[in-house]
Amino acid sequence: MRGYIGIGFWLFVLWGIFLTMADAQTTFILERVPLQTPAGDTIFVTGSFNDWNPGDPAYIMRKRTDGKYVLTLGKLKPPFEYKYTRGSWPRGEADGLGKPQPNRIQQEGNMPLTLADEIFGWEDLPSILPIARLKVVLEEIPENTPQDASLFITGSFNSWLPGDPFLKFQKMVDNTYEVEFPIYKDTIEFKINRGNWESVEGRKSGRARFNRRYVVKETSPEVLQIKVESWEDLSGTPINAYTIFWLMAAIQGILLILVINTLQRPVPRANLILSLLLFVFSMALLARVAVYDREIFQWMPKLLLIPDFLYFLYAPLFVAYVRTLLRVSDEAFSWKTFLPFLPFLIHFIDYFDLLLMANRDFINLSVDQRLQTRFEWLGGMAFVYNLVYWIYSWNLIRAYQEEADNQFSAGSSVNLLKYIMILKALCLFIWALLYIFGAYALFKGGEHANITDVTTDIVWMTFSFTVFLLGYFALKEPDIFRLPEKNNTLLEPNEILPSSSEPKIPEQVKEIDEDLKARLIRYMDQEEPFLNPKLNLSELAGGLEIHSHELSRIINQGFNKNFNDFVNAYRVEKFKKLLQEPSFENHTFLAIAFHVGFNSKTAFNRSFKKLTGHTPRDYMNSIGKTTEK
């Protein structure tokens, strides 16, 4: 037994050693070698790790069946420098111009490390003929470019070596810059720099620029005219119109959380959901502002992903807020409550590989636009998802509005929700244009990433107006966030039916009680209950000593109006009457509107226009009354 234990111990130790060695491995892969490489030649890796021995037999690369060359080494950690040879220095690798290839440098990387490279030529062999020659003309450079700066182009054609002396721009008499070089592939990627990666070109906003791409055309010689919008190291502050607006919206969102949670105790569940919605939205805006700063982006590049999490989180949170605010459902939390958040969970899991990725690798992928297709597919699915939720929310709000107009004389407090829905509809429209314009640019062979960036910024700008809209209503109509108790809210249809043994006769076959209708008219004329701005169906039914369901039927069928329009018609007529009385001559028209029972200028204007066909201003002008009071 002791012997088995000993064997097991040593197997465990060997297994640990094997795993340690595997974790420390560095793999070199040659994705491409020049077409003129002799079939029987051996390719070596040489570098600072083997004293730069160009023909070391321990560093021979193995050719695979797919034509690629591979070599795996152990215990090789960055930083180090290396090159490829065919056994001696005269037969070392060259760049795409046939010049000696500078040392390749690996500064950092996580173990195990895989290096994928391409060789474009050999020093001792004639280079392959280029398929074209490209002339790049810099028509415009940033004003803050140092006068003595040297400008270079670097790209896939020279192993992305910045400051390549063979690819230096020459300043022309018209203050443009030109460089001409051969192209060996039909598609190239490149950037402009001032000699190193710290001084590479950026976007107008100062953020890192994606690789430029050029596809060889049939015309020759090729001429490409471009403009450099900024330099990353000279971009200065990331503050611009977008970031200022988003920062203000984020700050207001946080302030609103404090405001709406101090208006009422205990805090209603609807306000808690709204607070959560404002919090995640504000955090997304702050993250979007932060990644505009080059240093923050280099430090925490994955902040770029945070706004994306709103794709599948905002819609279910907003619907939960609407349903709770309108008392559509007061169900306790259950597994069904969290079902709408399943797409968000799937999205979060899908981003796991990006969240765990090394910062440097993530920066390279995002700047080079190699994640763009993935983001675009995800955004397309999110667009459909948010569109479905928008339709559902709109139907929910509209149904509530119709029912509220039959119970409340002041109408329902859904104007805020309607404005938010209009903003969301505009966002969805711009979102759709983003894909339409992007697809058109892609079809034409242009750079659609520029269009995507601008359109995305416009979507976020439009969406940010939601926070300012909430702030406006919090100041103008704070009662919106002071929610009524449950027993004072809108009744469900099954709750307003007669509770006695009265037979349930379909409304369309019931006849209107003309005496009751006349009693209602007399009560409205003599008692003037409409002067109460909070008058509702139940209160009016109580004054008449009838059931609210019966009163609703009389108003709907007898006057062909809903409760809201019925009451507001009396208020409008009272307003027109008081406007002619001398005792109200010095009152403003808004003061008179409040006197007759309207609770806001907006409600008064809307009802007056709906019931008379004229605006209050037009009506008063027609009767010779001034509107400046």
Image (cartoon, rainbow, N blue to C red):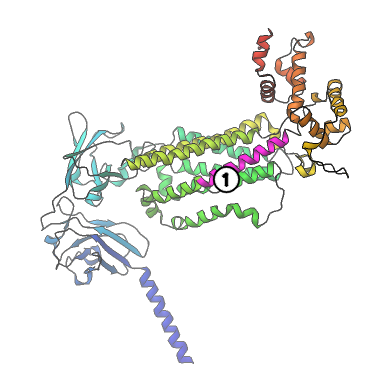
**Are there few (<14), some (14-19), or many (20+) residues within 10 Å of tag 1?**
many
* Closer-to-camera residue (624/562): 562
- Classify residue 312 as left or right of residue 223: right
Q: Main secondary structure of the magenta part?
A: helix
Look at the picture and state if 342 lies above or below 543.
below
191 w.r.t. 68: above or below: above
Q: Which residue is mark 1?
A: 315
Q: Is residue 592 left or right of residue 443?
A: right
Label total for image: 1
Q: Is residue 387 part of the magenta span, yes or no?
A: yes
Q: Is residue 393 magenta?
A: yes
Under circle 1, the secondary element is helix
Q: Magenta stretch?
A: 384-405
Q: Position of residue 276 (x, y in %)?
A: 61, 45
Classify the position of the C terminus by image quarter.
top right
Q: Farthest front residue? A: 509
* 464 versus 620 height, above or below: below
Q: Nearer the viewer, residue 226 or 519?
A: 519
Q: Is residue 441 visible?
A: yes
Front residue of 124/494: it is: 494
- Image position of 87 (left or right of 606): left
**Is any part of residue 409 visible from this angle?**
no
* Residue 250, placed above or below residue 617: below
Task: Give x and y (percent) for residue 13.
Answer: 42, 80
x, y percent for residue 503: 85, 43
Side of 357 relative to 273 (left or right): left
The amino acid type, in three-letter code, at marker 1 is: Ala
**Residue 517: percent from left, percent from top:** 84, 27
